[in-house]
Amino acid sequence: MDQHKNMQNNEGDKPSQLNSEQEEFITLLSKRGYDSLKNGDMDEAVSSFKEILQLDSKNNYALVGMGDAYRKKGDFQQALKYYQQCLENEPKNSFALFGIADSYKALNKLVPAISHWEEYLKEDPNNVNVLTRVADSYRKLKNFEKSRDYYQKVLDTEQDNDYALIGLGHLYFDFNEYKSALHYWERMYNKSPDQIDIRILTSIGNCYRKLLSFEQGLKYFKLALDKDPENFFALFGMADCYRGIRDYEKSLTYWLKILENDPNNKVILTRAGDAFRVLKNYDKAREFYERALKIDYDSYAVLGLALIDRDHQRYDEAIDRLEELLKQNPRNHRVYIEIANCYLDQHKKEEALETLMRYQRYGSRNNYVSSMIEKIKHE
């Protein structure tokens, strides 16, 4: 937005004592100030606009210019002060409304930001830059309907607007509507598959991953890795999709690739431990679980170690680890199942049944636990 070229001065705001020489000087200062803004010299811009305000304290050019300069300097409170002064003079000044809204957004005050953007839209209802800002803000506030409606207004104006397509994808993804998210992100991909941003590729891959369509997910994560072989999200997606199709060797390749760049990532250490355990490389599995636990407590690492103990028929050790997990989360149905399995491996049906009944006494219900109870009772 070029205030210098487009903002209209309100003649009624000019002090009557200004003579033609002062008005000409203000015009020159205003041009210098906006040139400085354009060139990134905020201090020079502030100096120019301050000179104007000393002559004409209600000059909207200078007030908005001061707001813009302080906003670009990152001093949003100061920016707000000058934009508000402008709006006191001219409540519908579009440049002040735009600036004040962006300042509130930068301060993460989305409600007043939206209020000022919506005021702006009363005069310029098809401004796609403002419409997408409002839509993005409503999305961050988890207001699905409002966000969707504003994105749709953008698409009504520009059918293939990138920001609206990306925003709608994120909106539907945030609300777990992965097929709808795919619709918009794949529209982005189909527009220009060779120039597509890597973040869209990983987002599409994540949708397919969430939908358990792992083969489809692999396609997009591979495309992302072609653009950036070190991209964390693409590597994670590849690993998790291979895990989903139970190709643990390939999954492990990508977990280990992530750890080359991020050796203390506790989640990835545990995932690698899981892969080693499923592949029956127990020494490596234990090594990775213990590396994770040295960083911080991790319930999945403890569970993995318990499962190694069970596989080696160290049932007492396994049960002790699992009971420790229950102290952290007494409603975790999987832990009760694993304890019950330890007892069943030892032909201790009563203990297994009592463990599963203990879970149900918390008032919790799980179909697998219920069917396991019935199976034990009827064996």
Image (cartoon, grey):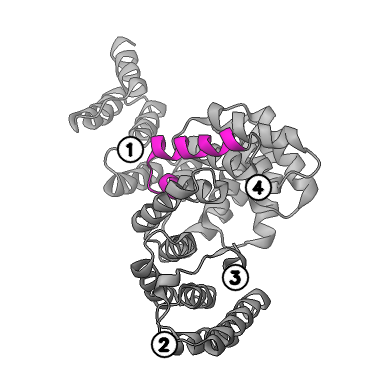
Residue for point 51% across, 36% down? 153
Which badge, 4 or 3, comes first in the chain's sequence?
3
Q: Nearer the viewer, mark 1 or mark 2?
A: 2
In terms of secondary structure, where does tag 3 sit?
helix
Circles 2 and 3 in contact, beta carbons < 8 Å: no
Please tell me whether residue 151 belongs to the stretch shown in magenta.
Answer: yes
* Screen quadrant of the C terminus: top left
Mark 4, Cα crowd under 10 Å, few <14 / some 14-19 / many 20+, is: some
Q: Residue placed farthest to the top in the image?
A: 378
Kind of residue sitting beneath label 3: His
Circles 4 and 3 in contact, beta carbons < 8 Å: no
In the picture of the structure, the residue carrying the numbered disc 3 is 4
Residue 36 position within the rendered picture, expressed as x and y whole percent measured from the top left? 64, 81
User: Residue 229, can we see it?
Assistant: yes
Q: How far apart are marks 1 and 3 (CA)?
A: 63 Å
Q: Quadrant of residue 274?
A: top right
Q: Nearer the viewer, mark 4 or mark 3?
A: 3
In terms of secondary structure, where does tag 2 sit?
loop
Q: How far apart are marks 4 and 1 (CA)?
A: 34 Å
Q: How far apart are marks 2 and 3 (CA)?
A: 23 Å
Magenta highlight: main SS: helix
Kind of residue sitting beneath label 2: Gln
In terms of secondary structure, where does tag 4 sit?
helix
Q: In this view, does 294 lie above or below 143?
A: below
Label placed on residue 17: 2
Which badge, 4 or 2, comes first in the chain's sequence?
2
In the picture of the structure, the residue carrying the numbered disc 4 is 199
Q: Nearer the viewer, mark 2 or mark 3?
A: 2
Mark 2, Cα crowd under 10 Å, few <14 / some 14-19 / many 20+, is: few
